[in-house]
Amino acid sequence: MSLKFEPLTPDFGAEIFGVNLIGNSSDSLIEEILDLWNEVGGLIVIRDQILTSEDHINFSRNFGPLFGDLNNPPLQDTVSRYIHPHFPQIYRVSNQTDNKGEPIGRKGAGTYWHSDVSFRECPAQASILHGKVVPPVGGDTIFANQTKAYSSLSKGMKSIIDSLSAWHDFEIAARTQYAKPILVEDDIGVKNRALHPIVRTHAVTGKKSLYVNPGFTSHIEGFNNEESELLLEFLYEHCIRPEFLHRHRWKKNDLLIWDNRTTMHYAVMDYQDDQPRYMERCTVIGERPA
Ligand code: OGA
Ligand code: MN
């Protein structure tokens, strides 16, 4: 069998047609999806997937172990309130509350450029997001191709950043994104802080990508603050050039698979609370960036 797909942009992302991921998908289908995912730079859209949370988890495990899986670490304690009560692998993003007024998901998750969980020693590789309730318009997610962002730098700039590492720290986003009583103070510190190369090499494709993000990167190792800020600001401006972007407009039952090793993303919060949005995410634990 051969996958039917169309590119989302000339060199980044693909939409797959005619597959149904309910239950256990065949090994050959999974292999084809994984190959295509790697080939197109780590962004796949599959529409019309009517999946239970269990289907979603089963499919996601083909990529690797999940945050929240038995014997694997969970996400930060701060977001434990947004984890699905029956499925510890499912992180919920939503602007809605239940009948007791409790949020049924993280409101305004990822409304800044970031790569998921980059503050861990072993950050996320794939994130697999299922749009269960989406506004008729608004609430798009924008993706930025960090392989192209790297490859379009000059030889001179590449040679400067190739050997550098930067610190990633949950605290950077936490201090501005979470109200005081929600933030679990124990999340601030070494368990959510990690040093990663600014340029990482993909474990499967061998391609290099930029790996810094305004959401979680705090500073460049070995540089003073002014130097670090200057270089990071240049990289942040460069890495979201329009040529590197794809903007996804959600429809109900869309399944998106992105590779956090090669992309960043930004959730656009331009919709109101009377426009319900409810998404479920499985997050695959990746290797240590190198
Ligand atoms: C995420 C995230 C994007 C969105 O789930 O990792 O950043 O559009 N969400 O909800
Ligand atoms: Mn995210």
Image: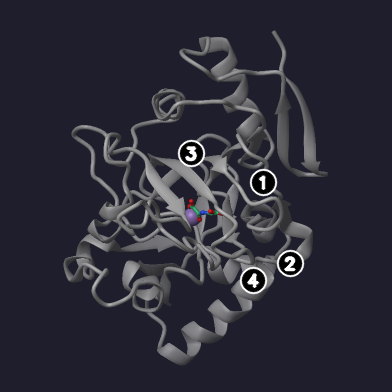
Q: On residue 241, which mark appears?
A: 2
Q: Seen from this angle, which residue lies furthest right?
A: 10
Rendered residue at 57%/57% (across/down): 264
Asked if disc 4 and disc 3 are in contact, CB closer than 8 Å, the reply is no
Q: Identify which amino acid the numbered label 1 is placed on.
A: Trp
Q: Is residue 187 left or right of residue 93?
A: left
Label 3 or label 2, whichever lies nearer to me, is 2
Q: Identify which amino acid the numbered label 3 is placed on.
A: Ala
Query: Which residue is disc 1 drawn over?
Result: 250
* Label 1 beta carbon within 8 A of ligand 1: yes
Where does the image place residue 137, in percent across and percent down from the top left? 71, 55
Residue 84 falls in which quadrant of the image? Answer: top left
Query: Which residue is disc 3 drawn over?
Result: 203
Q: Which element is circle 3 on?
A: loop
Asked if disc 3 and disc 1 are in contact, CB closer than 8 Å, the reply is no
The earlier-in-sequence mark between 4 and 3 is: 4
Q: Residues within 10 Å of mark 4 (few under 14, many from 20)?
A: few
Rendered residue at 71%/18% (across/down): 18
The earlier-in-sequence mark between 3 and 1 is: 3
Q: CA distance from mark 3 to mark 1?
A: 30 Å
Q: Nearer the viewer, residue 190 or 201?
A: 190
Where does the image place residue 50, in percent across and percent down from the top left? 56, 25
